[in-house]
Every structure is written in C-alpha cells, then in structure tokens.
Image (cartoon, grey):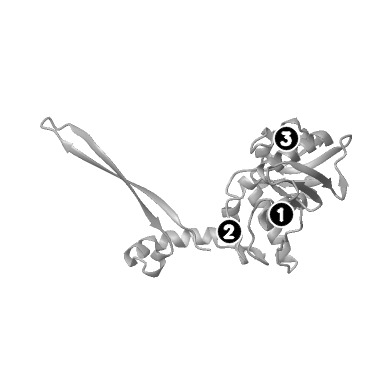
Amino acid sequence: MKKQVIIPFLMALAVVSCRSHYELKSIERSRIVVDARYDTQPDQEACQFLAPYKHQVDSVMGPKMGRSARYMTAQRPEGTLSNLLADILVWAAKDYNETPDFGIYNMGGVRADLPKGDVTYGDVLDVAPFENKIAFVTLSGADLLELFGQMADTGGEGVSHGVRLVITKDGKLVSAQVNGLPVDTSKDYRITTIDYLLGGTDKMTAFKKGRNVNSPQEKRNNTRFIIMNYFKDQMKQGKEVDSQIEGRITLNVEH
C-alpha cells in the first residue's frame, strides 16, 4: 500500500518600508501532495545526494526479523495485527516469570500495518515507534469488567487469544469471557499490557486501579524489541508469523 504524505506549505508576502522595517502584509496557504507519482520520475541529482544516507538508513532498517504470512492490520472491533501484538505480549511473559491470563495492546499504539512476506527492523519500528515497555498488572474481576466496558466504548482494543467480548455499536459491553469462562467479580486477573496504559490513558482508566505492577524499564523491554524477538523466534523455527480474525471482539447487532 503506497503511503501519501501531505506537506503543508506556507507563503508569506512582505514589503519593506523606507525605514527598512519588514511588515507582514498577507499569508497564503497551500499544500504539496507527496505520493507514488514522484517514484516514476525521480530527480537524479536528489537521488545521488541522498545515496550515502540511504545506504546508512537501509543498513539499520533493512535487517530481516522474520516473515509474515499475510498483510496484517489493526482494526476495530478486531484486527489481525492488534490480535497478534496482544498475543506477543503473552508469549513474552515467560521471560519475566509471569503467567498472565491475557494481554491487551491499545489500538493507538499501532502506527502502521504489517506487510506480507519479509518483515524488517524498519517494518517493526513503523508498527511500534514509541518507547512503550511491557508491563504486568493485577485487576479484580469487577475492575476488569469496568475496563472491558471502557474498551467497548472505544469500539475495541487489541486482546489476546482466550478473550471473548460482545459489544454493541454504540459502545456498550454485552458480555465478557476470559479463557472460556465469564469474568468472575470475586477473582483477580493478571494482565500483560504496555506501561503507557497503566496511568489510565486511551480512556482505559480502570488500569489505574491495578495492583502488583511489574513494569521493567530497561530499553530491552521496549515492545518493538519484544515484537522483533517473537519474529526471530518464529523464523528460527522455520515458521511464518500469522494471525486470524477469531471473534475475540464481536458486535451484537441486536443492540
């Protein structure tokens, strides 16, 4: 999918007075659309100028992390990429001596789609460009239902395998299950997510009630490195990374 970049362009018209004082007279605004049209007739002088820099960037962004079985996107109420990222957080929990019940990855933290085929460092960086770290937190069943209700209000977030939410088009939670059972308000649930959400951001304020937080802040715990580790692990096993729409979050058309 070709990306389109809109570059704002401002033009100011000024005059000079007899005292050499500049006075702004007017401002005009326009925009320049940068898209695939510029790929057909590249400016050779510009290409030559950028060549040494492109080589350096490619050497950093180009290394292959693994392969993707399909083009993946993050969509509401459920998307292949948002499913995958939540599953990866659960996969990584073993490295932190954690056994979470499920994972949550916020849609706002997914900034690009994932291509089919070879997946490079740059592809993962596009998906997860922020400095978010993996985190673990405990919520009571009652607080978890509140959290799921907040997620329903946004239209859905990324949840891992084993979560089943039914929501309405106007953002109401109809039902919630974790690993085949309805949420038990008398039980505690261990969740893996990203540290950014622990403060109740992205309208998930129930996270602020979390207990027993484990949020390691070393750089290696950044989500993009965890995603890369997962792809490398699958490539080592000779596997392509795949993800499906499974009905983790569905719309109840009757409401």
Any part of residue 194 in sight: no
Name the residue tied to disc 2.
123
Residue 46 to residue 215: above or below = below
Seen at 80% across and 50% down, the residue is 164
Picture coordinates of residue 47, whole percent (x, y): 37, 64
Any part of residue 149 in sight: yes
Name the residue tied to disc 1.
83
Residue 187 to residue 231: above or below = above
Question: For this rendering, which residue is in front, 10 or 251?
Answer: 251
Picture coordinates of residue 149, whole percent (x, y): 74, 39
**CA distance separating discs 3 and 2:** 29 Å
Picture coordinates of residue 40, whole percent (x, y): 39, 69
Question: For this rendering, which residue is in front, 88 or 2?
Answer: 2
Label ID, residue 22: none
Q: Amino acid at mark 1?
A: Asn
User: CB atoms at circles 1 and 3 under 8 Å apart?
Assistant: no
Q: In this rendering, would 134 be left or right of 48?
A: right
Q: Earlier in the sequence, mark 1 or mark 2?
A: 1
Q: In this rendering, would 100 be left or right of 119?
A: right
Q: Amino acid at mark 3?
A: Phe
Secondary structure beneath dot 1 equals: helix
Characterize the local packing of mark 3: few (<14), some (14-19) or many (20 or more) Cα atoms within 10 angstroms. Answer: many
Characterize the local packing of mark 2: few (<14), some (14-19) or many (20 or more) Cα atoms within 10 angstroms. Answer: many
Question: Which picture quadrant has residue 227?
Answer: bottom right
Q: In this rendering, would 97 be left or right of 116?
A: right
Label ID, residue 207: 3
Q: Amino acid at mark 2?
A: Asp
Question: For this rendering, which residue is in front, 191 or 92?
Answer: 191
Question: Which picture quadrant has residue 183?
Answer: top right
* Outermost residue toward the left in this view: 18
Question: For this rendering, which residue is in front, 218 or 89?
Answer: 89
Seen at 68% across and 40% down, the residue is 153
